[in-house]
Image (cartoon, rainbow, N blue to C red):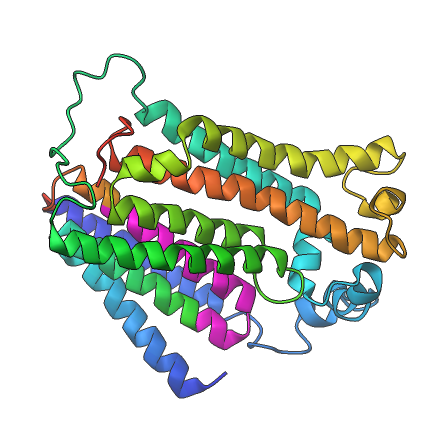
Amino acid sequence: MLSKVFATIAVVITGGILLYGVSDFPGFGDPHSPANAGVPGQASISQYFITESYGDTKVPNIVTSVLADYRGYDTMFETVVIFAAGMAIFAILRVVGDDSERKPRRKQESSFTNGDHSRIIIGTTCRLLVPVIQLFALYVIAHGHHSPGGGFQGGVILAASFIIIALAENLNSALKRLSETNYLKIACIGILIYAGFGVMCQVLESDFLDYGVLQPILMTDGPEMARSHSMLGVEIGVAFTVTAIMFAIYANLSSRGLLRDGL
Amino acid sequence: MIFAFDIVILVFLVIAAIISLSVKDLLSASMIFGIYGFLICLLWAEMGAVDVAFTEASVGAGISAVLLVATVYNTKRKSSD
């Protein structure tokens, strides 16, 4: 009880300090704030992105051009962080070999056509939904540099379509479509695609992830279009890793690392 | 940015946060956490950060709620404190 009182006092004090700090922030959308107008005497980086990023990369979505090109190194290691998180969950939860000690909570008796009517309705509805969800996910990935979206969001939606199969039927029927060896391979391939774009730029005697020099390989009109196409390739790499890792986390969490029965 | 809309979302955000912390049933706590994520997504979409809102809708409100439910299924349903 006493610890709760102390915790409450600590939370209130921290919250008060945070609120006091927020009161010093510039107003929302203030054109004269340092982030928007820049430090006096120096050009603002926001202004540079807004005016020049379309000419540099031919990508209408400024957020994607910043994420995948100007800050491409950052995004690569975000993907590596997701990969590492998936590997950590794999290392902690996954039971390989003798798994007699960890019993699943409940015996999963019902496959999806065993006369259990509610399961038939749910299973059929989800089977109809899954292609639509996957098509939308591919659209989000492929259209990420023209509209909101990109590799992370599209990858999560693609993983959600596999999780829906696992929820509606059972984990085994989802694993039949995306098996453990396959998703581990896909997770590695995704990062290798991203790093491969960077190394390819280095082979062509430029900096890591400086996509402009890929123009002769991608056969585009100019280095700007090469940047745009490379961003698409990089997003596809991110989507590979995110899809595989999100599904891997779900499969391991829902089945206690046994990869059978599940929810 | 509409001020009244902002206030409504923020009030619901605080309510969802408090309920998801205080409710004893962990399954409802994780569902309310999904609602919290979706309210943050609305707030971001309304501020004009559509990319962030999209990420929050798919990751915060979608996948993480499912992962929490999957975890609750394999542990106790009731919170002990």
> What secondary structure is the stretch in magenta mostly built from?
helix
Question: Residue A230 location in percent, x, y?
Answer: 74, 48
Nearest to the observer: residue A1 or residue A111 = A111
Nearest to the observer: residue A205 or residue B25 = A205
Which region is colored magenta?
Answer: B43-69
Is A96 on the left or on the right of A198, as rendered? left
Question: Residue B8 location in percent, x, y?
Answer: 33, 81
Q: Residue at x 55, y 74 (%)?
A: B48
In this rendering, is residue A191 above or below A167?
A: above
In this rendering, is residue A81 above or below B69?
A: above
Is A201 on the left or on the right of B13, as rendered? right
Quarter of the rendering occupied by the C terminus of chain A:
top left
Question: Residue B41 location in percent, x, y?
Answer: 42, 67
Nearest to the observer: residue A2 or residue B1 = B1
Residue A253 shows up from this direction: yes
Nearest to the observer: residue A75 or residue A148 = A148
In this rendering, is residue A261 above or below A35?
A: above
Query: In terms of image quadrants, where is residue B43?
Result: bottom left
Question: Residue A223 location in percent, x, y?
Answer: 88, 53
Q: Decide whether residue A34 is among the magenta residues.
A: no
Q: Decide whether residue B53 is among the magenta residues.
A: yes
Query: In terms of image quadrants, where is residue A166?
Result: top left
